[in-house]
Amino acid sequence: MHYQTVLFDLDGTLTDPREGITRSIQFALSKLGIDEPDLTKLEHFIGPPLLQAFMQSYDFDEPKAWEAVNFYRERFKVTGLYENRVFDGVIPLLETLDGQGRQLYIATSKPWVFAREIARHFGFDRHFKVIYGSELDGTRTDKVELIAHLMAEEGLDPATTLMIGDRKHDLIGARRNGLDAAAVGYGFGSHEELSAEQPAYYFETLAELHQAFLRG
């Protein structure tokens, strides 16, 4: 793994945000008169931009989808973002990459204000040069736009940069910006979803990902 710079997705790649996101989606839906008692049915919201996910899943028009997003944030910013856990093995991996002198960034479609608080709260912010995310108004929720912005702001070379993520949006964003991508199988994207995007690498577990970097 010759890459000098590594971009990480956040949800499903560094942390398991399942409880906080699904409970906050459930809260937003209840505010709109939709009862969904089964949190597992809301896991598909983890990863994609929320506005589009609400529109696609419930046939909301854009104003109603924004209403849902705002109800979601009402709970998420107070409670949901702390209902999260760092995947076992993430901290040792980040320490290895630090020790190898690589530059690390987070590239998430989650608003950066939430992403930076999660990284601070769970103690892994120190490993990242900058944490990039979307704006609260929806700007740069698209991974293609987000990665393009990050690459331009930081002056990075696509040939020496790797994107790591667990959903197709991460892989599409990397490919459209000329980056290699590594898909991880321990997050929320299915093997079918990820393999369809033909990533340069596929790692079923965090241990496999770590080993790849230890080999160089």
Image (cartoon, grey):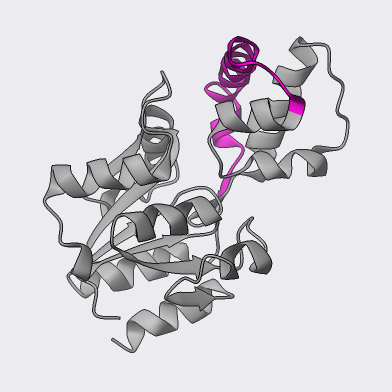
The picture quadrant where one finds residue 61 is top right
Which residue is the extreme one toward the bottom? 215
Q: Please tell me which residue is depicted at 64% across the width and 35% down the height of the picture.
A: 20
Q: Main secondary structure of the magenta part?
A: helix
Q: Position of residue 100 (x, y in %)?
A: 21, 75
Tell me if 149 is positioned left or right of 152 in this view.
right
Quadrant the C terminus occupies: bottom left
Quadrant the N terminus occupies: bottom left
Q: Please tell me which residue is depicted at 34% across the width and 49% down the height of the picture.
A: 106
How many numbered markers are drawn? 0
179 shown above or below 28: below
Tell me if 141 is positioned left or right of 31 in this view.
left
Residue 173 falls inside the magenta stretch: no
Q: Please tell me which residue is depicted at 21% across the width and 63% down the height of the picture.
A: 158
Which residue is the extreme one toward the left? 155
Q: Position of residue 90 (x, y in %)?
A: 46, 63
In the image, 28 versus 140, the foreground residue is: 140
204 shown above or below 174: below
Q: Position of residue 17 (x, y in %)?
A: 60, 44
Report if residue 130 is visible in the image.
no
Tell me if 41 is positioned left or right of 214 in this view.
right
The picture quadrant where one finds residue 131 is top left
Tell me if 68 is positioned left or right of 98 in this view.
right
In the image, 13 versus 137, the foreground residue is: 137
**Residue stretch in magenta:** 58-85
Residue 79 falls inside the magenta stretch: yes
Report if residue 178 is visible in the image.
yes
Q: Position of residue 137 (x, y in %)?
A: 41, 18
